[in-house]
Image (cartoon, grey):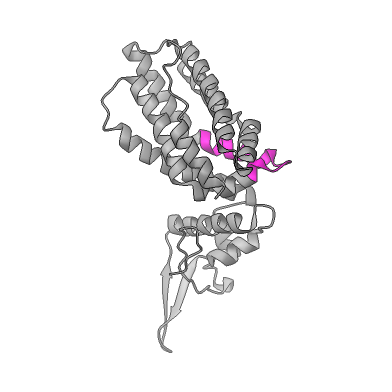
Amino acid sequence: MNDTGLGVYRPKICMVNDLYGYGDVALAKTDTKGDSRVRMAPAVRRDLILDAAQALFMERGWDAVTIADVQEGAGISRGGFYHHFAAKEDLLSGLIARMTEQAMQTTEAAMSQNNGDALVQLNGLLDGAAQWTADNVNELRGLVQIFSRPGNEIPYRRICDAEAAVVMPVLKAIIESGIAEGTFNPVDAGLTAELMLSLSQGRREVLIEVFDLASANDLDAAVDALDRRLRSEGEICDRLLGLPVGSVALSNRTEYRRMLAGLVQ
């Protein structure tokens, strides 16, 4: 097993000459009479590329990694890479989408065991997301480096867009359920979901401040700053949903302290 130190397993692959147009085929010669070709399923090949990109971004930083580096790390030909990703920025979108899907799968599995109303489901979603973030801090460390660097507004926008594509349908469905059962009273379910998500995506400057405080070993101040922001967002969400103040439990000091402590280790 090839261990990158990031929990990413990359099998070794022998590349087929692009002359034959395989690109994504692993070739192992078993004897002189013939070749044994093992084709990778597209989803497997895509994950292999994302695994390599994630490991390299965390090891070297976003700016230092090239597409050629990712191809080499994944053992994928140029054609095999561009079959899935048109540009380096698309790798970032792919990584965020994959992480967000993993987080949502974990969170929704926990929510499915809860038979409460839409508010209970919403708070379960938020709590599950906070726990997943703290549990997977190693995978998130490289992303923090990307979006916190000055001038990286475009990659940060990519992160937000990829996250929204996964989260928006789930959030909207919870709000619609809350309207149907009489728990929520928003003006519009879709617009409310967009506004709630935009609050979280507008945290970039606050998060940079929080990570700076945590990096300076002032973890208490970092948690306080994040808590203030999230409590304010929670109150706004309450008003959007027509709920009493304090209903949406957006802040989770315990899990965010755990996340910040992990990021600065």
Picture coordinates of residue 137 (x, y %)? 49, 46
Q: Quadrant of residue 155?
A: top right
Q: Quadrant of residue 222?
A: top right
- For the residue pair 214 and 48, the one nearer the viewer reads as 214
- For the residue pair 90 and 230, the one nearer the viewer reads as 230
Picture coordinates of residue 239 (x, y %)? 49, 12
**Residue drawn 36% across the image and 17% down it:** 178
For residue 6, say whether it is visible: yes
Please provide the residue range marked out in magenta: 146-164
**Residue drawn 63% across the image and 31% down it:** 206
The quadrant in which the N terminus is found is bottom left
Decide whether residue 83 is among the magenta residues.
no
Side of 230 where 216 appears, left or right? right
Q: How many marks?
A: 0
Please identify the dominant SS of the magenta region.
helix
**Residue drawn 49% across the image and 36% down it:** 256
Picture coordinates of residue 181 (x, y %)? 31, 13
Side of 58 where 130 appears, left or right? left
For residue 77, say whether it is visible: no
**Residue drawn 53% across the image and 64% down it:** 74
Q: Quadrant of residue 204?
A: top right
Picture coordinates of residue 231 (x, y %)? 51, 22
47 is higher (above) or lower (below) than 204: below
**Among all residues in the image, which is located at the extreme right?**
151
